[in-house]
Amino acid sequence: METALSLVVGCLFAVSLYLLLSKHIIRMLLGVVLLSNAVNLLIFAAGRVSSIAPPLVPEGAEAPLAAVANPLPQALILTAIVIAFSFFAFLLVLAYRAYQDLGTDDTDEMRVAEPEDDGLPPLGY
Amino acid sequence: MMHGALAPSDYLVIAPVAICLLFGAALLMMRKRIDWQPWLAIPGFLLLFAADVLLLLKVAAEGPQTMMMGNWKPPFGIAFTVDMLGALFVTTAGFVGVASAIYATFSMSRTERRYGFFPFMFLMMGGVSGAFLTGDIFNLYVWFEVLLMGSFGLLILGSEREQLDGATKYCFLNLVATTLFLITTGYLYGVVGTLNMADIAQKAARLENDGAVLTIAVLYLVAFGMKAAAFPLNFWLPASYHTPRFVVSALFAGLLTKVGVYALIRVLLMLFPPQHADLATLISWVAALTMLVGAFGALAQSDMRRLLNYFVIAGIGTIFAGLALTGGEGGASATVSAASAATQAGGTAPMTGMAAAAAPLVPGSDSLVIGLSGAVFYALHSIVIMTALYLAAGTAARISGSSSLRAMGGLWRARPGLAALMLVFLFAVSGLPPFSGFWPKVILVRGAFQAGMPWLGAVILLTGFLMTVASARVFALAFWRNAPEPAVAGGPNAGFAPAGEPSPMLAMLPLLILAVFAVVAGVLPQWLVALTDVAARGIVDPAGYVGSVFGGVS
């Protein structure tokens, strides 16, 4: 099971990296979404897919008595999903506003903050 | 570990985070009372700083402190563990928070306050404080995201074209860096099966130093190096840090890159010492190139704020140089404690280069501790001085109507007090005595020579020289010369809009507060070196950190 998951994670990473290398913001956004989902699957696989028994601790005991499923990766993934989703929402709005104001979604042409013809600083006075 | 009822002073461990989030939420509810906001925010930051100082005193007196959230048994549940390193960083962060809040009170327009400047600032400070205090590596990731979300909000405050451009680059690259951090944490969890840093420190020591662990260490180096803007992952910083309001730039330059540095120290040096030794050569190259990129980049800029962006990068390189000094067994016997550098500061004898090498040997200290102590000292100095420089630049730009060196001038005559303070900060950032940048550089250069890396010491000195040249250019053009003709001021290179900066007299107060640190840490560095020495020893030998989490039960 972990082998199959790791293959899926690898494919997702490859696709998301390819998209992130693009010059266009919209493709990079899709790359970010795929990247966060790849990480979620990675954490799931790193936590080992083993038993399916629920991780319940009987009254009086301090630890589960038999082998149980690992609940921690799911808590981590839930946190990561919420964070990734909120960031994606922010990036989406930011990309749209940048497109509206700068008139391009090509990162090579986004040179407002770092103008190309800035010239040398004054060397004396 | 704490059992049973907690004493009120035990809550200090989470007080910085709790104060930030509570005040942030309260200010969010007061968004229709924007005139009241500063008068709640400034006491909030003073309270935060007071809690930070009390926490620092408690850690200095009693050693590392741990609080388990929900009283779970370690290593389960989330631990907040504060040692000297975290306490020093969080206290310095609180210090610049107070100064920035006062500055912001007089500089942010009503519209920007309505868009939530103060709530975002508290949210970001909460994330920064949480990152410095947490003892759980996944929780560290969460705090990174909290501070990142706060910083996004601050960065685009104003929605100008430059800001949208800079923010796009900043957001994507920082998001990729934190995602890389999360990826690596997933791998780490798969290998050691725990997320508590004290537990990882114990379990990683028992692991074989094989490819898997080295891969994790390298990935952490890349992720935190990107957050810290180390070469060759520094491009997002000069693309964005000059676009927001000056006070926002000041907070970012002071705090955000240093969170990356702190995380690197915490993770690479405390959790993976053998892997850190393997990577030391790589880190030394990264450090040297980062310093040179920062120094040469600063020389090439004609806008004051963009020049300061490169000063931040040069400072990061200097900190990294301290992390590259490993305690080579051969050199360890000849090393002296970093504290001896400070002993000299008390005396009146002139500095005569390496004369201090004759100082008494302190057993147990090696290049690793000296380098780390110098790096921590430099990081604390850099937090304060970079914040101060951006705030001072904001005031100067307000008076001149531009932050371009082509258009500025005549400030020495117009505002001698501001010019004097700017000179203090420029001396400090270049590492000239008698200000705070001098002693950490002495420690780092000497540590580099003792660790058998004289070339790294030479690069630190060369960077200091180049930064002095760049600082001199700032001072000569913006302050010393007479104001240029207005025709130049209105030209196409008028610089980035310095709108809404404070009236100069009120802006002097936070600058004076920050200058006190530059002078005190420059003239009386002993106490600070003693503290950073404790912090460095606590990282090199994390027994105190581990003992605080597991309460000796293990």
Image (tube, helix red, strand yellow):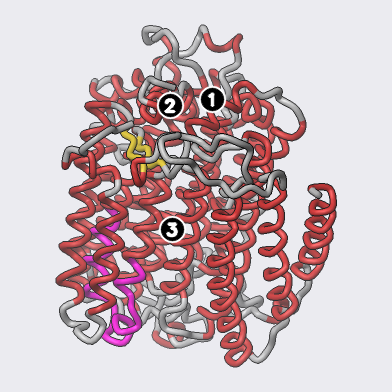
Which amino acid is tagged 2? Val
Q: What is the crowding at mark 2: few (fewer than 14 residues within 10 Å), some, or many (at least 20)?
A: many
Mark 2 and mark 1 in contact (Cβ < 8 Å)? yes
On residue B202, the disc is 1
State which tag comes first along the sequence, 1 or 2. 1
Q: Could you tell me which chain the residue with mark 1 belongs to?
A: B
Q: Residue shown at 58%/23% (left/top)?
A: B326
Magenta range = B95-121
Instruction: Provide residue B503's location: percent of width, then percent of height.
Output: 21, 76
Q: Is residue B118 magenta?
A: yes
Q: Is residue B290 left or right of residue B108?
A: right
Q: What is the crowding at mark 3: few (fewer than 14 residues within 10 Å), some, or many (at least 20)?
A: many
Mark 1 and mark 3 in contact (Cβ < 8 Å)? no
Q: Is residue B44 magenta?
A: no
State which tag comes first along the sequence, 3 or 1. 1
In 3D space, how far apart are the residues under numbered discs 2 and 3 (Cα atoms)? 32 Å
